[in-house]
Image (tube, rainbow, N blue to C red):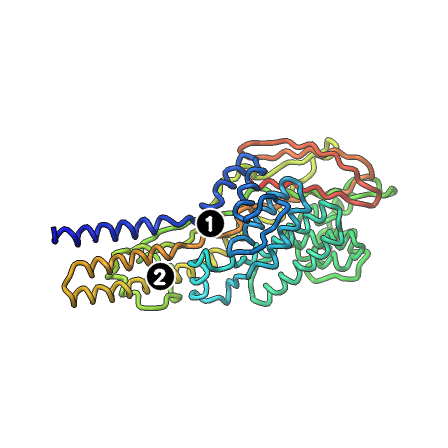
């Protein structure tokens, strides 16, 4: 009987440790019900699920206390509210979350700082990544434009500029071209052609878009600003006679603008990933701190870290007809690709942080093994294994990210005669859908149509 007691302890310690490792739900697990509801187009149910995580009973409410994950959940809810065309509440959520979120510096943060963030899901406020931060202001510009609120959109445009300039000062490459394009549109409609041209110059990186050609050519004759890149672009456009032709509507009558912006799909998301220690050491390179040799004595030779995985999106692109005529739908920003690029930049530090913490676990377990050898008992050896397994459970990777952030932003823009117009949007993908939208364009005014489908 006495010989069986240590064996029973051994089994229970290992079992309890492994159960602890698997017992804590990640952020991805927590919002899975919202994802499943959104996948079927049931945004109302998805919003209710997020309300529960925010500790509120209605989308009209925001939390009294902002815990570690709630600002991020507010961003998630904002995108679902935008998809339901509840732009006022979506704008409220985006603005409220902005004041609570911290910023993750991909260039300057050390592996140690990133490790503290990556492995303290419940303790640390979510650190928003550069692309997410810029998209936050850009998507809020969309909310205000959809509400025909130029003043609110201009505030978000200025916030976007401040954030982008700050990121540039840190040598981060994130740009968020669709934010620059929307800011150019905002200040064009405000009657500030020079300011608009500065933003449109930034949007040239998206390529030679028809949605960019007409306003650049038209505004270039009204403003004095001509940057080098903008001048090269104008010269290229003016060399083509077709680019000089009016878009639609007679130049002798007042014209208006229809801007259609489509936010489709969802960006890649994070899940816990396990890889062998040897592979992790090769990926982490020089970022590891501590002595990796101690891992040779570890019984738990896997590294757990948050890996980015692609999502299967229901809607991938669209076609648009305006009053029965086909209009070009152009990709303005691939946010999914930008999120992947940012993740690959920081991935070695994430792996290094996981290894560094694993080294600390192995060192603690080795201390217990030394105690076991000194005492010569099986119980102390089991305690060493239990110590390492329990610490492994504590290192639950943080899988938080803005999961309802749209994967791709498309734009369709055209000049039209004042009056009523019919827009047909055909969403392409696994479950095609058709939308018919009637709009009334005032003389020399504009209408912004937002099609947001985060699925």
Q: Residue 206, percent across and down?
A: 63, 51
Q: Nearer the viewer, mark 2 or mark 1?
A: 1
Taking the image as shown, residue 24 lies to the left or right of residue 209, namely: left
Measuring 58% from the left and 52% from the top, which residue is drawn there? 63
Give the crowd class for mark 2: few <14, some 14-19, many >=20 residues within 10 Å: many
Count all numbered tags in the image, as a single digit.
2
Cα distance between the residues tagged 2 and 1: 22 Å
Taking the image as shown, residue 24 lies to the left or right of residue 126, namely: left
Residue 373 lies, with reference to residue 134, above or below; the image says below
**Helix, strand or loop for disc 1:** helix
Residue 443 lies, with reference to residue 198, above or below; the image says above
Residue 142 lies, with reference to residue 314, above or below; the image says below
**Helix, strand or loop for disc 2:** helix
Measuring 61% from the left and 46% from the top, which residue is drawn there? 409
Disc assigned to residue 425: none
Q: Residue 351, percent across and down?
A: 39, 59
Q: Are marks 2 and 1 in contact (CB under 8 Å)?
A: no
Which residue is labeled 1 in the image?
27
Nearer to me, 391 or 107: 391
Which residue is labeled 2 in the image?
355
Mark before the other along the chain sequence, 2 or 1: 1
Q: Can residue 232 be seen?
A: no
Taking the image as shown, residue 219 lies to the left or right of residue 356, namely: right
**Furthest residue toward front:** 1
């Amino acid at each position: 009987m006495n010989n069986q007691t240590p064996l029973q302890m051994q089994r229970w310690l290992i079992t309890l440790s492994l159960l602890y490792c698997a017992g804590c739900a990640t952020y991805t697990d927590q919002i899975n019900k919202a994802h499943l509801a959104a996948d079927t187009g049931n945004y109302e149910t998805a919003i209710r699920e997020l309300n529960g995580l925010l500790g509120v009973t209605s989308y009209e409410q925001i939390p009294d206390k902002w815990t570690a994950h709630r600002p991020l959940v507010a961003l998630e809810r904002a995108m679902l509210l935008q998809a339901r065309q509840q732009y006022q509440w979506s704008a409220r959520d985006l603005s409220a979350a902005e004041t609570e979120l911290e910023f993750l510096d991909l260039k300057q943060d050390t592996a140690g700082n990133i490790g503290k963030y990556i492995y303290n899901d419940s303790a640390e406020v979510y650190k928003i990544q550069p692309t997410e931060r810029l998209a936050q202001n850009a998507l809020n510009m969309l909310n205000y434009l959809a509400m025909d609120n130029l003043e609110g959109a201009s505030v978000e445009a200025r916030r976007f500029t401040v954030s982008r300039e700050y990121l540039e000062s840190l040598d981060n490459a994130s740009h968020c071209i669709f934010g620059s394009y929307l800011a150019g549109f905002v200040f064009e409609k405000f009657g500030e052609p020079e300011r608009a041209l500065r933003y449109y110059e930034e949007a040239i990186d998206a390529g030679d878009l028809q949605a960019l050609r007409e306003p650049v050519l038209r505004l270039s004759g009204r403003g004095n600003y001509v940057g080098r890149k903008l001048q090269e672009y104008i010269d290229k456009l003016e060399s083509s006679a077709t680019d000089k032709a009016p878009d639609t509507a007679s130049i002798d009558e007042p014209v208006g603008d229809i801007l259609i912006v489509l936010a489709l799909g969802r960006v890649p998301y994070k899940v816990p990933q396990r890889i062998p220690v040897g592979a992790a050491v090769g990926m982490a390179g020089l970022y590891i701190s501590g002595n990796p040799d101690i891992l040779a004595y570890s019984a738990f030779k896997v590294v757990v870290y948050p890996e980015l995985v692609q999502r299967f999106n229901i809607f991938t692109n669209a076609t648009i007809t305006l009053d029965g005529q086909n209009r070009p739908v152009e990709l303005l920003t691939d946010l999914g690709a930008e999120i992947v690029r940012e993740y690959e930049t920081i991935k070695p530090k994430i792996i290094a942080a996981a290894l560094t913490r694993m080294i600390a676990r192995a060192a603690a377990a080795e201390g217990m093994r030394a105690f076991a050898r000194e005492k010569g008992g099986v119980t102390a050896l089991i305690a060493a294994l239990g110590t390492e397994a329990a610490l492994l459970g504590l290192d639950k990777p943080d899988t938080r990210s803005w999961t309802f952030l749209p994967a791709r932003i498309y734009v369709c823009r055209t000049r039209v005669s004042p009056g009523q117009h019919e827009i047909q949007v055909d969403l392409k993908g696994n479950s095609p859908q058709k939308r018919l939208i009637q709009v009334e364009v005032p003389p020399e005014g504009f209408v912004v149509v937002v099609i947001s489908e985060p699925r």
